[in-house]
Amino acid sequence: MVAACKSTARKERRERRREGRSDEQRRLALLRRSGLFGGDTKGALIARAVTFRKLGMAYGLVHDVFVEEGYIHSQPSGMRVRPFETDRQTATFIAEHGDQVVGVQSLVVDSEDLGLPSDLAFSDEINTLREGGKIVCEATNEAVDAAFRRSAVPTEMMRALYAYAVQIGCNELITTVSPGHKAFYEYMGFEQIGDVRSYSEEIADPVVLMAWHLDQVEALYGAVDPSEDTLAAFMKRFYITENPYLAPMRSWSQLAEATFADAEEVGLFFRAVPELFDTASSDSLRAMQSRLGSVAFALAMAGTEAPALSA
């Protein structure tokens, strides 16, 4: 009887392993058939936006897509720009096709004075991630032109985002997504840590909070042979061993830093977004002043209805 029970238990374990491998192979096949992986961006090139011309085009696309989807109200500037975009550490990656920006995704780095965009709805969950002094970053501003949504543009921008997060030492990467997109982000490495809530106080925008524990990436993929035909090997190649954005990331960061060092150019760019200052709280204005510098901030504020800050 004991021998029979042991034999049955071994068969059940083998069956579970076979089922696990079968499920993994199905998921891997699905990823390959989706058109979202494999690098086919329909001719679009992925890079970090390192000039204000490119940033303006990027935030213009975000604005137009978000207005069309009902996520935000139309803005006078035709751009979606928040205090987070005044921080030179905020990296915005774009997909360019010819002279058009057809995809955008930004990474915002946590700070004491501004926090993160999703603090509005998920502050408790994000504070838990912050424990122990961990650096938390947020993927935001995701917008893709309709003609490129079934291409590799979204996933290639995520690869670039990962490369930047690694460069700056980000420990936790979060994002808010509609519940219908949760499965895609789980494929990309994220897990859900917050239930469904509205991201906006003005417009119904149900989202869930997803987190990717970047501290665990090495333990998860470190011993994986990237030549294997497994989901783990596929993701290791995708993010680490064959990620084309790891090499140019430092030079892109230097170019972006140089752009934000030109006070006049900075001031003129943000002056074109008067709603950013007209609707900001005094705390947000001080946070933006500390990031832009007094000269650029004064140029940007000229002509707005925002109250002057006391010295």
Image (cartoon, rainbow, N blue to C red):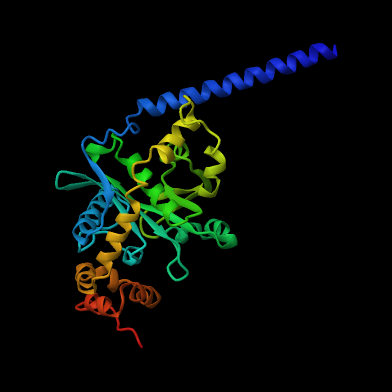
Q: Quick check: 131 left or right of 212?
A: right
Question: Quadrant of the rendered structure where residue 129 is?
Answer: bottom right
Give the total number of marks visible in the rendering: 0
Q: Position of residue 73 (x, y in %)?
A: 27, 58
Q: Position of residue 3 (x, y in %)?
A: 82, 12
Q: Quick check: 150 left or right of 228?
A: left
Residue at the bottom extreme of this rendering = 311
Please name the residue shown 40% across and 29% down the image: 31
Please name the residue shown 30% across and 55% down the image: 252
Name the quadrant of the N terminus.
top right
Q: Nearer the viewer, residue 32 or 280?
A: 32
Please name the residue shown 60% across and 61% down the image: 132
* 102 to 171, vertically: above or below: above
Using the rendered image of the protein, determine whether residue 81 is visible from the camera's viewpoint. no
Using the rendered image of the protein, determine whether residue 136 is visible from the camera's viewpoint. yes
Question: Quadrant of the rendered structure where residue 159 is?
Answer: top left
